[in-house]
Image (cartoon, rainbow, N blue to C red):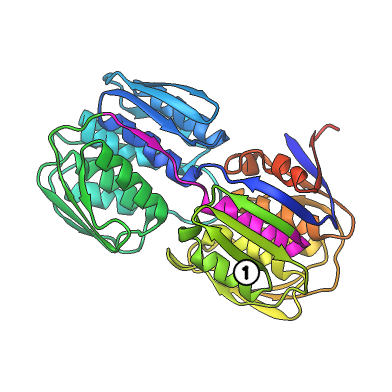
Amino acid sequence: MEKLIIKGASKLNGEVVISGAKNSSLPILAATILAEGTYHIGNIPALRDINTMFKLLENVGVSSEFKNNSAVINNKNTDSFEAPYELVKTMRASIVMLGPLVAKKGKAKVSLPGGCAIGERPVDLHIAALEKMGAKIEVKDGYIFAECEKLQGTEIVFDKVTVTGTENIMMAASLSSGTTILKNAAQEPEVQDLAAFLRKMGADIEGDGTNTIIIKGKEKLHSADHSIMPDRIEAGTFLCAVAGVGGDIILKKCPVKSMDAIIEKLRLAGLQVNIIDDETIHAKMDGEIKAVDVKTAPYPAFPTDMQAQFMAVMLKSNGVSVINESIFENRFMHVPELKRMGADITLNDSNAVVKGVHSFSGAHVMASDLRASAGLVIAALMADNESTVHRIYHLDRGYEGFEVKLNKLGANIVRASDNE
C-alpha cells in the first residue's frame, strides 16, 4: 500500500482545474447498459472506482476504451447479467448496476456492495422499489437475484432520501411500461446530470432537481454522448484546504451553482469567495478561522461528503464549532486520527464538538474512508511539522491526482510505498 508524507505550514497559491464528478460518472456509465450502440462520454475522472465500473460493464457485455478522461463505450447487449463480488466488494456505488440490468436484460445477479465503512447504506430501498415495479427479488449467498419480464410503472415513495436509490429506479423506470413517480427523491446535481444523460438517450424524465421525479417508460432507448459535470466535492475540498492553510487560489471548471451550502459555510468561517463566473471561483484566506456550526443533510443542504474536510478547517478556529452528522452514523472515524495530531474534539452521538487550538503537530494517521482521507490531508497541511497519511487507496477512489494538484499550489506532499 501507499502513503502520503506531508509537510505542513505551506500556503496554497495558484490555479487548479476541477475534475469530472465521480458520483455522476458511475451511474451514467451504468446507464449505458440500457441501450445498444456506441457512446462517447467525456470529463470522466481517472479513478480506482471508475476502473472498477469499466470492469463491471465489461462483465455484462459493455466494452470501453478510456483515455485522457474520455471513454468510447460499445454496448453489444450480451446475455451476461452478473456483477460479481470480486469487483463489487470495493465500491458501494456498484448497486446502480441493479436497475439497468433488470430493466434491459430481464434479470440481474449483483453482489451486495462494499466500499467505505461509514455506516449503513441499506439496499432495501432499491429492492422494495423494484419489487413494487414487478421484479421478483431474492437475496442469498451475498447476492441480489432479480428477475422480471417487464417492469411496470408505479408510484414509489422512498422512506428516506437515497441518491443511488433514486438513480437506480430512475434508470429502471426509463425502460418500463407506464409512468413511474418517485416521491421523496434525491435532488442532488449528480441525479440531475444522470437525468440529462437519460433524456439524451430518449428517456422521458421531468422533475429532477425536485423531490418528485416523473418517468414515462419507453420501449427502447438509444446511445448518446455526454460530458460529466465537474465534481462539487473536489471543488469544496480545495476550498477547505485554502481556508485551513491560507493562501489565494482560483478554481476552474467548477460547478459553482451546485455549491451554495459549501460556499456559505466557508464564507462564515472567514474564506473570501469571489464568484467570477459559472465555472470559476477565486478564494482567498488571510485572517483567522472563525468557528462555524454545520449540519449535514441531503442536497441542497451541506453535504455529508464535505463533513471531514470542513472539520479539518475548524481544528484551528477561534472558538467552538458543533458538527452534526445526520446521514451516516459512522462518519466520525477520522476523529481519533485527528486527535492524534492534537485536535480537541469531543463526540456526542451524532455531534462532534470541535474546540479550535492554536497549533497541532503532525503524526502518522490512518484513513478510514474516502472523504476522511481528504480531511486528514488538509489537517496535515495545517500541522506544524510532518505527517504521514496511510491507506490512501481510499483517496485514490475519489480524487484524481489530489497530491499533484496540491503540490502545484505550493504544498509539499510525497507519495511513497509503505515499505519506504
Residue 417 left/right relative to 179:
right
Q: Residue at x 43, y 66 (%)?
A: 300
Q: Residue at x 54, y 37 (%)?
A: 45
Looking at this view, name the residue that lies furthest to the bottom.
Answer: 319
Secondary structure found at label 1: helix
Q: Is residue 36 above or below residue 12?
A: above
Q: Residues within 10 Å of mark 1 (few under 14, many from 20)?
A: many
Q: Position of residue 51 (x, y in %)?
A: 52, 29
- Judging depth in this view, the residue of 406 and 180 nearest the camera is 406
Q: Position of residue 174 (x, y in %)?
A: 21, 42
- Judging depth in this view, the residue of 52 and 241 nearest the camera is 241
For the C terminus, the quadrant is: top right
Is 331 one of the magenta-colored residues? Answer: no
Specify the amino acid type for callout 1: Leu
Residue range of the region highlighted in magenta in the rendering: 223-247
For the N terminus, the quadrant is: top right
Looking at this view, name the residue that lies furthest to the left.
Answer: 178
Q: Position of residue 371 (x, y in %)?
A: 61, 53
Residue 23 left/right relative to 1:
left
- Judging depth in this view, the residue of 141 and 69 nearest the camera is 69
Q: Disc 1 designates what residue?
A: 266
Residue 136 left/right relative to 354:
left
Q: Residue at x 38, y 54 (%)?
A: 163
Tally the numbered discs.
1
Q: Residue at x 28, y 18 (%)?
A: 78
Residue 122 in sight in this render = no
Residue 359 left/right relative to 294:
right
- Occupied quadrant, residue 288: bottom right
- Judging depth in this view, the residue of 343 and 189 nearest the camera is 189
Residue 343 in sight in this render = yes
Q: Position of residue 380 (x, y in %)?
A: 79, 55
Looking at this view, name the residue that lies furthest to the front.
Answer: 276
